[in-house]
Amino acid sequence: MKKSLEFVHAEVEDLKKDNEKLKKRDVETQKRLQSLEEQNTILNNRVIDLQARSMRDNLVFYNIEENEEENTTEILQSFLESRLGIENAKSIKIDRRKQRGTKPRAILAKFNYFPDRERVLSNAKKLKGTNLAISEQFPEEIVKIRKRLFPEYKKARAEGRRAKLVRDKLYIDGQLFREANSTSS
């Protein structure tokens, strides 16, 4: 009985030692996991930033009528002249492609010169009251954040305050707006 009790006691001691080793390994694993998650977040943010930078020169045009034999560049240049009043729009260099899915499909235009893009975007207000629209292009993650911020933007504008959406941030009266449960960077 005494030998049996000593054996069990030795087993318990061995199990305690093994348990301590496992606890240490678990703590180390948790630290590594946390470090990897932080690195993943940093890399994901860098990818989103790179996507946003590559889309910086892009505008998306919505609800422009299309036909089978169209030259999208000519249609866009004609649209810029007739609807936005931009003179000599044919001199604006545009690389274009249609986005899939919608009818009429949205036209994605990459402007070769950023000032041309800004001139077009600043004239987009002339489309107010029509079903035509122009917007900046952003990565999906930024679009989700902007959709969350947009009601606050509209509310601030309705109150007569200066509000501006810049990429994935909202500024109201020059101050960065912080959501109650903000997860954006």
Image (cartoon, grey):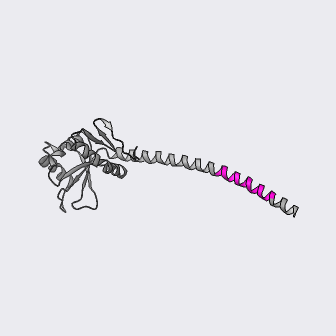
Q: Is 11 covered by the magenta stretch?
A: yes
18 is higher (above) or lower (below) than 185 = below
Quarter of the rendering occupied by the N terminus? bottom right
Residue 152 locus on image (x, y percent): 29, 46
Residue 132 or residue 54, whichever sits in front:
132
Residue drawn at x 88%, y 61% is: 2
Residue farthest top in this picture: 174
Q: Which residue ends up furthest to the front in the rendered image?
A: 1
Q: Residue at x 17, y 49 (%)?
A: 77
Judge left or right: residue 6 versus residue 156.
Answer: right
Locate residue 41, reporting x and y percent. 47, 47
Q: Magenta region: which residues?
A: 9-25
| Figure check: 22 above or below 103 | above
Magenta stretch holds residue 156: no
Q: Position of residue 55 (x, y in %)?
A: 32, 47
Task: Please state the horizontal and vertical placement of residue 106, each as a whole percent of the image.
Answer: 24, 56
For the point 44% across and 48% down, which residue is it?
Answer: 44
Tell me, yes or no, if residue 142 can be seen here.
yes
Q: State whether residue 92 appears in this view.
A: no
